[in-house]
């Protein structure tokens, strides 16, 4: 009597398929640049259009000699940084048949994290794009060099005055520069970095030469990689509200919209700088 094997092919209609309860999400660029600058938080929530931040000039004191006082000459007008917040959003529209027949868990649970992440990325991108216009600039016509890195730090310290403190500067570099940076002994050697009883850095640069090193692909690319080093007051982020996600039912669809209103502007230009690197591959 002939016998036959039951295989996955012949029993296909009897075999269940399993789906994970929680989806995975594609990798996003490292963010956090807005934590490196002045975030005004809830200060400007509510009514109001443009936001003006006055900047008062410095006035050096003189020794008193008993003679008539010499009053400061207002040769320079006081300055103002003006921010005009605008709305940024991320949105999808899910059809009713998808909602009722496919989505488990619900569409809002699946798509809200992705929409929110896209929204959170935008202020970082905007800030790093602003960094490409900072006045203090060094350029490596080729690969990244520690000489240019140190020159930029020195320039920021010189030009930024009391807005700059070593150890409180944040560097944001493109990750494709990581291998070059970590091939320079002065960047990973414990002896050079002043870390007693410590081994060489193994991957995480951390604080070096007064700069907290971060890597993200959000660094602006225009002919060159426009990496930046900033102090807290180099730029200002002014918010009109907190990020929010809203849903609306209309015409047999569910609209899921993430939005927020903000502006980023350079505040103290000379307290930061850009490190341009022409090697972009």
Image (cartoon, helix red, strand yellow):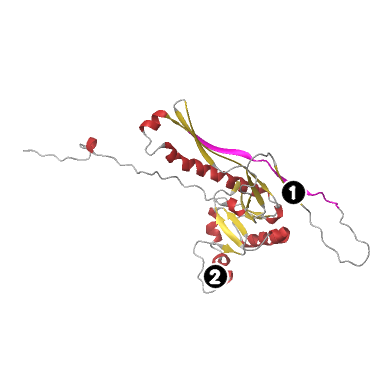
Q: Which circle's residue, 1 or 2, is located before the other in the chain?
A: 1
Q: Which residue is mark 2?
A: 190
Residue 84 left/right relative to 14: right
Give the dominant element type of the magenta stretch: helix, strand or loop.
strand
Label annotation for residue 191:
none
Give x and y (percent) for residue 146.
Answer: 61, 62
Viewer-proximal residue, 189 or 26?
Answer: 26
In the image, residue 253 sits, relative to residue 17, either above or below, namely above
Residue 229: tell me if it is visible.
Answer: yes
Residue 166 left/right relative to 4: right
In the image, residue 256 sits, relative to residue 57, either above or below, namely above
Badge 1 element: strand
Viewer-proximal residue, 104 or 46?
Answer: 46
User: Are dots 1 and 2 in contact, CB under 8 Å?
Assistant: no
Tally of numbered discs: 2
* Residue under the point 57% across and 59% down: 213
Residue 222: tell me if it is visible.
Answer: no
* Residue under the point 53% across and 57% down: 178
Q: Residue furthest top?
A: 251
Tell me, yes or no, whether the highlighted magenta stretch contains residue 136: no
Give x and y (percent) for residue 26.
Answer: 45, 45
Magenta span: 74-92
Q: Which residue is mark 1?
A: 54
Q: Residues within 10 Å of mark 1 (few under 14, many from 20)?
A: few
Badge 2 element: helix
In the image, residue 272 sits, relative to residue 46, either above or below, namely below
In the image, residue 262 sits, relative to residue 98, either above or below, namely below
Using the rendered view, name the quadrant where residue 99 is placed. Answer: top left
Give x and y (percent) for residue 231.
Answer: 65, 56
Q: Classify the position of the N terminus by image quarter.
A: top left
Viewer-proximal residue, 196 or 42?
Answer: 42
């Amino acid at each position: 009597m002939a016998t036959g094997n039951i295989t996955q092919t012949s029993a296909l209609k009897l075999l269940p398929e399993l789906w994970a309860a929680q989806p995975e999400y594609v990798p996003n660029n490292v963010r956090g640049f807005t934590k490196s600058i002045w975030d005004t938080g809830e200060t400007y929530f509510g009514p109001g259009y443009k936001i003006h931040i006055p900047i008062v000039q410095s006035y050096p004191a003189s020794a008193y000699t008993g003679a008539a006082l010499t009053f400061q000459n207002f040769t320079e007008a006081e300055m103002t940084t003006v921010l005009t917040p605008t709305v940024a959003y991320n949105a999808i529209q899910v059809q009713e048949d998808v909602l009722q027949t496919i989505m488990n868990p619900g569409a809002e649970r699946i798509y809200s994290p992705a929409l929110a992440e896209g929204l959170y990325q935008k202020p970082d991108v905007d800030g790093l794009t602003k960094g490409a216009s900072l006045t203090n600039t060094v350029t490596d016509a080729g690969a990244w060099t520690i000489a240019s890195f140190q020159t930029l730090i020195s320039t920021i310290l010189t030009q930024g005055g009391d807005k700059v403190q070593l150890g409180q500067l944040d560097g944001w570099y493109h990750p494709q520069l990581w291998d070059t940076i970590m091939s320079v002994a002065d960047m990973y050697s414990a002896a050079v970095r002043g870390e007693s009883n410590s081994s060489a850095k193994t991957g995480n640069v951390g604080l070096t030469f007064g700069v907290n090193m971060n890597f993200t692909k959000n660094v602006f690319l225009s002919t060159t990689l426009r990496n930046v080093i900033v102090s807290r007051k180099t730029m200002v982020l002014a918010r009109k509200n907190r990020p929010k996600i809203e849903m609306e039912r209309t015409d047999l669809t569910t609209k899921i919209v993430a939005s927020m209103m903000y502006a980023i502007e350079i505040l103290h230009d000379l307290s930061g700088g850009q490190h341009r690197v022409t090697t972009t591959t």
